[in-house]
């Protein structure tokens, strides 16, 4: 099945260079700062089958719609990193993150719950009412599996770090196995059991339930296997590595935005927790 047609447009995003910060529910610092922030974001995590995921943080899965509404009251666009593969219960307990992600991605029980959980998020952010709950209905962004999509998935097919979950090696998401159409979740029946099929199925769920949400995927500086943010070798061909990752991302399926995080903490935290002068290191 091909990627679904969709009408989502980035025209709802600011036309200027925009800024935002992570902030929890009921945060008052952002509005009190006096800065005209454009975005406010919150991780959705906890696992899709653990009984502790975001859908349990408020009743009826209303955490996401409530957070989005609160952000909109201050004219912030809500953004949610959807980070669920790692913390879901699956057969690979105690594994490293990349192996656990890949194992969960290929477990029918995990993925059936995963797609149902993602569909619930779409319903809560959409324009319609489901289960007696009115959706948010305004522009929002969902960042799908940031570390996996823009890092481990790329390394799996290009570098062979796939723990027997690849059917080939090369710059193509169709080489990475995933349980999608065979998960038993009716809304994604017919999509291929590959990483490309996963991204197409996620876009299909968005299109079914929530015309106002933009999907994005993260491109990590270490996606190629060489962390170009830290590698000081002057002979590293960063442009070629970027082209490699960009080519793969162009084949993943429908999405509107690509993200990149040059650094996941500010210099103060590196100095306080790790006694590293990271600002000087990156200058």
Image: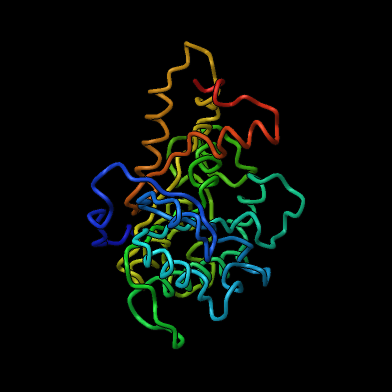
Which residue corresponds to the image point at 48% horizontal and 39% vertical from the top-left? 261
Residue 248 lies in what quarter of the image? top left
Q: Position of residue 61 (x, y in %)?
A: 53, 76
Q: Position of residue 73 (x, y in %)?
A: 37, 67
Left/right of residue 247 with respect to residue 66 in the rendered view: left
In front here: 144 or 102? 144
The relative height of residue 157 versus residue 61 in the rendered view (above or below) is: above
Q: Position of residue 115 (x, y in %)?
A: 51, 67
Viewport quadrant of the N terminus:
bottom left
Residue 59 lies in what quarter of the image? bottom right
In front here: 36 or 243? 36
Q: Position of residue 125 (x, y in %)?
A: 40, 70
The relative height of residue 71 versus residue 66 in the rendered view (above or below) is: above
Which residue corresponds to the image point at 67% horizontal and 50% vertical from the top-left? 100
Left/right of residue 250 with respect to residue 80 in the rendered view: left
Which residue corresponds to the image point at 70% horizontal and 36% vertical from the top-left? 273
The relative height of residue 277 versus residue 109 in the rendered view (above or below) is: above
In front here: 282 or 85? 282
Which residue corresponds to the image point at 43% horizontal and 22% vertical from the top-left? 238
């Amino acid at each position: 099945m091909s990627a679904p047609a969709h009408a989502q447009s980035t025209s709802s995003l600011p036309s200027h260079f925009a800024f935002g910060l992570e902030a929890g529910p009921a945060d008052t610092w952002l509005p009190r700062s006096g800065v005209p922030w454009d975005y406010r974001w919150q991780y959705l995590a906890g696992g899709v089958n653990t009984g502790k995921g975001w859908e349990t943080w408020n009743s009826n899965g209303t955490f996401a719609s409530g957070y989005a509404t609160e952000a909109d009251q201050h004219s912030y666009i809500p953004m949610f990193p959807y980070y669920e593969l790692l913390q879901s219960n699956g057969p690979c307990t105690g594994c490293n993150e990349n192996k656990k992600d890949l194992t969960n991605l290929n477990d029918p029980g995990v993925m059936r719950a995963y797609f149902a959980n993602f569909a619930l998020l779409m319903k809560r952010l959409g324009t319609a009412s489901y289960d007696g709950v009115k959706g948010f209905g305004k522009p929002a962004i969902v960042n799908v599996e940031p570390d996996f999509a823009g890092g481990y998935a790329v390394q799996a097919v290009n570098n062979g770090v796939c723990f027997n979950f690849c059917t080939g090696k090369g710059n193509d998401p169709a080489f990475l196995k995933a349980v999608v159409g065979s998960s038993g979740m009716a809304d994604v029946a017919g999509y291929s059991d590959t990483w490309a099929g996963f991204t197409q199925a996620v876009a299909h769920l968005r299109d079914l339930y929530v015309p106002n949400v933009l999907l994005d995927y993260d491109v990590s500086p270490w996606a190629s296997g060489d962390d170009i943010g830290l590698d000081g070798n002057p002979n590293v061909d960063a442009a070629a590595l970027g082209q490699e990752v960009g080519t793969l991302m162009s084949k993943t399926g429908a999405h509107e935005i690509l993200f990149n995080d040059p650094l996941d903490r500010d210099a103060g935290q590196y100095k306080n927790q790790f006694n590293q002068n990271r600002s000087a290191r990156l200058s």
